[in-house]
Image: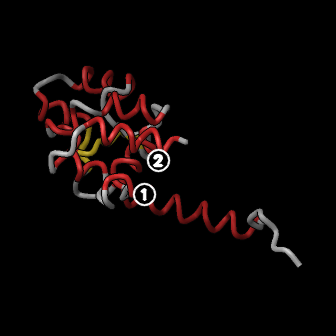
Amino acid sequence: MTRDLYASAAETAALLREGQAYRRERLQAADMITVVEAASLMGVDALTMAAWTSGGRCIGIAGPDAAMKVPRWQFETFVWSSIERISQSLGTRDPWQILDFLETSAPALGGLTPRVALERGTGIERVLAAAIDDAH
């Protein structure tokens, strides 16, 4: 007998619950800051920061209460200059997908996360190639 290739309703519900819990925890992590804090860090007003998040220039995650949070580390030079290009290579502007890509180890980068690879000086072209691979 072959195993069904699809998850059961119970398995699907469990996966969705796990995903929701992960998202709640990630939004509450110490490296996530408010739009106002990010604007202050970057020397711009909150409206500019909100425009950057909605325009895909930076990663902005809306929480269950609709309050936007952003990962502080994305404003480091090595990541900041790469966000839009990574988004294009992934073929998405979904902030969760971009965040997940940057924080998940990539075989093409020797097991490093793209964020760490950039931090350690890996060329952006290599990271973009990993993003293209991830998108397919």
Q: Which residue is label 2 attached to?
A: 64
Q: Are marks 1 and 2 in contact (CB under 8 Å)?
A: yes
SS of the residue at dot 1? helix
Residue at 82% from the left image edge and 68% from the top image edge = 4
Q: Quadrant of residue 35?
A: top left
Answer above or below: position of 86 versus 23.
Answer: above
Above or below, 118 against 52 in this view is below
Q: Secondary structure at mark 2?
A: loop
Q: CA distance from mark 1 to mark 2?
A: 8 Å
Three-letter amino acid code of the residue under disc 2: Pro
Q: Quadrant of the N terminus?
A: bottom right
54 or 86: which is nearer to us? 86
Please name the residue shown 29% across and 58% down the image: 112
Judged left or right of residue 77, residue 95 is right
Tell which of 78 and 124 is nearer to you: 124
Image mark for residue 24 = 1
Residue 68 appears left or right of 122: right
User: What residue appears at the point 47 percent right and 44 percent down from the top-left corner?
Assistant: 133
Determine whether 104 is above or below 131 in the image: below
Q: How is the image coloured?
A: secondary structure
Q: Amino acid at mark 1?
A: Arg
Residue that protrudes farthest toward the right in the picture: 1
Residue drawn at (14%, 36%), measured in percent from left and top? 77
